[in-house]
Image (cartoon, rainbow, N blue to C red):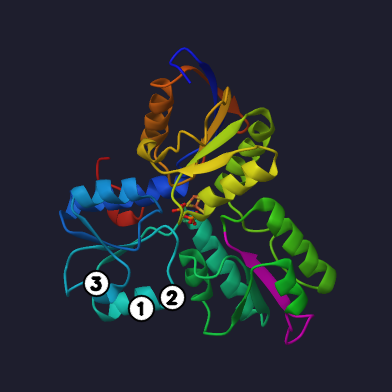
Amino acid sequence: MAKTDPLEIILCAPRGFCAGVDRAIQIVELALQKYGAPVYVRHEIVHNKYVVDSLKAKGAVFVEELDEIPDTEAPVVFSAHGVPKKVPLDAEKRAMFYLDATCPLVSKVHVEAQRHHADGMEVLLIGHAGHPEVIGTMGQLPDGAISLIETVDDVAAFEPRDPEKLAFVTQTTLSVDDTANIVAALKARFPAIQGPHKEDICYATTNRQEAVKQIAPEVDAMIVVGAPNSSNSMRLVEVAERSGCPRAALVQRASDIDWDFFAGISRLGVTAGASAPEQLVDEIIEAFGARYDISVSSNVTARETISFNLPKELRAVPA
Ligand code: 2E6
Ligand code: F3S
């Protein structure tokens, strides 16, 4: 490879921040502006170290659980992934001032699960064990009320209380294709099962996967800018591989690029998970620009115009 070697870079569009991530980060930034530091944040506000470190530098303090926070009048922000019901209850018991940055599309799933439970249905959640969104959604109902389904095999093994009274909800960041198979298996085994029209995968997850599917067969390699604990970003790497891209890699920063892995390529696809800032995409393109003669274009597969309201406490703060 020499600086004269041509490299065509094709950027997937849409990529990067979704409306829920944008809102969650704004909540922390505006809380810092309005109330001053510290602002406590329960869990990474979104799954990206660069975002978290930038907010830390402005005075945000990240914790995993509320019991790590001293008694304080400082605001406590709940991350975009949502929290079990117990978390706001515990915060209220301690008279904490909290701001909920749960993505409204995750809150919608919480409401669905509660509605099914109130209607006397047994609720299944399709998702990945241990993910904070899954913990948050399962925590909307009493312990044991939601059963987790991760695979088609789990569908075969599941024993319902009453197959006529079953409902399902899903995590928002799953593989569209894997989830379609799981939902098909559920419907085949339990024809009366209730649920959303397809699943609860959000618009941003769907659009980013679709964008990767279009580009993956056309390029020699694909970079997904994002973090290893970011479910939606990891799904983009899988989609690229399954759609025929011979080399797909998750990259957090330009300094992480394994140059041997990308040796000999002439077309590179680039996307970014919903929690990855565009600065990191720019940094990675620049790193390729230092080694190749690059030309950059975008492949637009959808246009996103959605945005979410801020919590009322922060609406009057100048951005
Ligand atoms: C909240 C809900 C969904 O790991 P995951 O993809 O869920 O989370 P992030 O922070 O990488 O992406 C944004 C997000 C927040 N997605
Ligand atoms: Fe919300 Fe989907 Fe983003 S659930 S935080 S819009 S990835």
- In front here: 268 or 211? 268
- In front here: 318 or 247? 247
Which residues, given as a range, are shown in magenta? Answer: 158-171
Residue carrying label 3: 96
Identify the mark at residue 126; answer none if there is no mark: none
What's the residue type where badge 1 is placed?
Answer: Leu
Q: CA distance from mark 3 to mark 1?
A: 10 Å
**Who's the residue at 79% across and 80% down the image?**
164
Above or below 224: residue 27: below
Name the magenta segment's main secondary structure: loop
Residue 283, given in percent of the width and then of the height, sits at 37, 31
Q: Secondary structure at mark 3?
A: loop
What's the residue type where badge 3 is placed?
Answer: Met
**Who's the residue at 38% across and 50% down the image?**
48
Residue carrying label 1: 89
Look at the image and tell me whether residue 121 can be seen: yes
Residue 138, given in percent of the width and then of the height, sits at 53, 74
Q: CA distance from mark 3 to mark 2?
A: 15 Å
**Who's the residue at 64% across and 45% down the image?**
239
Say whether disc 3 or disc 1 marks the residue closer to the N-terminus.
1
Residue 38: name its quadrant.
bottom left
**Who's the residue at 68% across and 80% down the image?**
121
Say whether disc 3 or disc 2 marks the residue closer to the N-terminus.
2
